[in-house]
Amino acid sequence: MSEVILSVKNLSVEYRVEEGIVKAVNDVSFDVKSGETLGLVGETGAGKTTIALSIMGLLPVPPAVVTQGEILFEGENILAANEKYLRTLRGNKISMIFQDPMSALNPSTYVGDQISEVIMLHNKVSKDKAREMAEECLEMVGIPKNRYAEYPHKFSGGMKQRVIIAIALACNPNLLIADEPTTALDVTIQAQILELMEQLKEKKGTSNILITHDLGVIAKMCDRVAVIYAGEIVEMGTLRQVFKNTAHPYTKGLFDALPGNSLSGKRLKPIKGSMPDPTSLPENCKFANRCFNKSDKCDQRIKLVDIGDGHLVRCVSPLCSEGVKSH
Amino acid sequence: MNASKSGRKSQFKLFFRRFCRNKLAVFGLIFIVFIILVALFAPFIAPYGYDDQNVSIRLTKPNSEHWFGTDDLGRDVFSRMIYGARVSLSVGISTTAISMFTALIIGMISGYYGGRTDNIIMRIVDVFLAIPSILLSIAIAATLGGGIVSMLIALSIGAIPGVSRLIRAQVMAECHKEYVEAAKVTRASDFRIMFKYIFPNILSVFIVTFTMGVAGGILNASMLSFIGLGAQPPIPEWGAMLSEGRAYIRDYPYLVTYPGIMISITVFAINMFGDGLRDAFDPKLKGR
Amino acid sequence: MKKYIIKRLLWMIVVLLGVLFIVFVLLEFTPGDPARQILGVYADEEEVAAKRLELRLDDPFLVRFGRYVYNLVFRFDLGISYRTKLPVMQEIATRFPITIAIGVLGLVVSVAIGLVAGIISAVKQYSWLDKICNVFAVIFHAMPNFWLALELSLIFALYLKWLPPTGYKGLKYLILPVAALGLNGSTAIFRQVRSSMLDVIREDYIRTARAKGQSEIKIILKHELRNALMPVVTMIGNSLGAIIAGSVVVESIFSIPGLGNYMLQAINSRDYPVIQGSVFVLAFMICIFNLLTDIVYSFLDPQLQSQYQSNVKSKKRGVKA
């Protein structure tokens, strides 16, 4: 197996706000290996973005507080590192693509200058050289370089997302975190952007963390998947393990709620209920209240267990175990 | 019916709780209530009349008998300030009421009908806005020749353009919303849509603007009175008192200081109250 | 961009005509006969009638308005002062520079204070610095500027004797009036800067800049300020208006022989042509200033720029490369 470049260990993050303590991330651990794409999937509010911001060292403090855990990148704990060191990582070795491309670019600066900004920050190059490199980046994401000196408001959403990808990849990072990179875009544009990301990943060998609530995107892009529910990983494994041998009732619920997955003529099966209030999370299984497979055993703290071949599930009665095909 | 009533009640409770969390706003409210009571019961509170002259005790410094001293005509400054609350508050509130009401109609018509109507009205408003509102008020008051009534007219007209523009912007934003479309589909009359549908939705902005307007009204009234275009002697308006005390500032600074503090605290309290209202109406804006 | 400026310029002329009209209507409402006012109480009826004829006061309203505009535009004539019997324009011209100086200095002070305090306050939101700035802002906002002026002169001129209390013999005499107007005016700018900075700080593109590894200082300078200043620029015209309106009273408090003080004297002696003329000239000054801020704004706002870009595009690029 290839080497681990990022390792998140027992991460817990809280937001301390007026209404109470929001436990956004609870004891989350995962690794990202060199060259692979890890998908984080879950509902809105499950804590995916908080995980991403923790890795970037960009958590809004206050109200965010990291209560435990460490994030190791190149052997260095990001959570304990100083701001100056983090700045040398951000945009350089770890980059991030944000959800809404419409507002992620500075409206009063040329798009090209926004790319050369990051180049000049991390490379000792002249202004002209940086401009040249930024133009290459534009071409790389399929934007003609003569649009360097234009303002973002002249670009469509898809074009803006391309620019943002160009910014993120301008310094050839080792790790790219993409937080719902296609959610705000039209379906046709979504496909283009995903295609582009895949191409660039092949070309540059960047490891990716792809955050999404769209299982289709996961299936297309990822090598491994972690399913997040109420700030916890409830199931994690290779794409094949999670998709073919779905073991957690929540993951199964996600699949059943997909339009394409139910046979034609059948009704969609939504997961009933909603996520528990993050200010007062139950100690026992957090999905129990919505679970179709609930039993007395669920009323306890549940650990993430390996059901075979590194397929991890947080459930006392997993729907299947590795090797035994239940479908 | 019942459900909506109790819903409204709990909404009000929530609003009230949010308001109470802002200590300065609560102070503002308490002070406003206090000053209104003082204004209402001035004759019972003030130890002397506002025009009780006694030249033998003119310009006595603050003492146990005359807490804030006496002015150049031997009148009790403390009593005059209490009576002054009546003038300042009533001028502030009534000019704001007049200007807000007029501006509501102008802004509503302009924002609701849009197009050419809006264009014409707003161009006229623009012309008025080219003159700073207080300068416009000064010019109008000077033309009308001073006195409380002309001050009322001058201040009201001075405030209308700015507020009209604000209300228009609010109305326009509401007009794009679906409930207005829905109301149009049901063939509700324009008047009904404007005041039954749109107005409740801009009410919070209206109330906050009104509150702040009263503070501005009191400030501007004091300025007009200070330059002799507002309340005429012997009426004890705070700005007028400042103006009368100005000649004695070197030796009797209290004649200038106390009325000024009174204006400032009142305006401060109203502004804080308005800020609190705005935050309570729209918690998202908090801290701005 | 040229097109835009021309458009603003034309609109300014319309606005000024409108202002003149308002001023002229006000003049119509003033009590008393202008001819009588000019000649004084001792003139007899015949002289007054002759003067009325000479000034053609019996012409219809619009004709007289036309003449008023014509006289102003082509002869720089705003009528004759009732009190001094001198041409209003001449009287205004000598006093005008002082008021401009006070207005501009007051604006500079209020922008400087408002900008610095607003940025600090927004960047360090909820800190004690933010709280102090806010407290000062609400306090100065609540003080009438003429009262602030009186208190400043009481403290710094009468008690401490650091500065001259009244008169005008050099810049030193302008410190107190400018301070009073500037402190008062800074509160509005402070609020605007702070709130638009807070808006911008929450924007996604600031997060993007952080994700690039940009330092906080550079983020403020490069990404936040320019975007946050746009709404501030549009309100600076208003601020100047408020400062100039305030200078009407503040000049008189410090006995500074500016336009404001002159206007106040005219108010006290009901010298209407002077009042109207002063209002017009002050409005004119503010309009010019608004035009300037509009032009500055058009250079700051890329959306507006591209609307009118066709004829500047090539030049701009040349400069950039």
Image (cartoon, coloured by chain):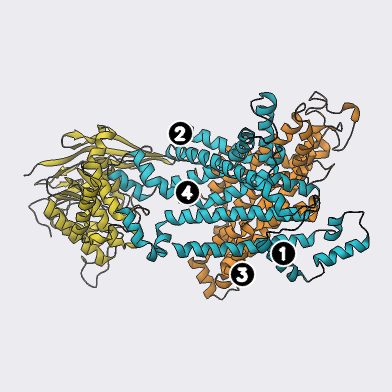
Judged by depth in the image, the label closer to the viewer, 4 or 1, is 1
Q: Which residue is mark 1?
A: C68
Rendering colour (chain C)? cyan
Judged by depth in the image, the label closer to the viewer, 4 or 2, is 2
Judged by depth in the image, the label closer to the viewer, 1 or 3, is 1
Give above or below for A6 relative to A240: above
Q: Residues within 10 Å of mark 2 (few under 14, many from 20)?
A: few
A30 horizontally vs A12: left or right: left
Subunit of mark 4? B
Which quadrant is the C terminus of chain A positioned in? bottom left
Q: What amino acid is found at the position of numbered circle 1 in the picture?
A: Tyr
Q: Secondary structure at mark 1?
A: helix
Q: Which residue is mark 4?
A: B284
Do marks 2 and 1 share a chain? yes
Rendering colour (chain B)? orange
Q: Earlier in the sequence, mark 3 or mark 4?
A: 3
**Can the viewer see residue C71?**
yes
Q: CA distance from mark 4 to mark 2?
A: 19 Å
Q: Which residue is mark 2?
A: C127
Residue B123 coordinates in the image, percent (x, y): 59, 65
Which residue lies at the image location 72% right of the left edge and 38% below the top edge? Answer: C255
Q: Quadrant of residue A87?
A: top left
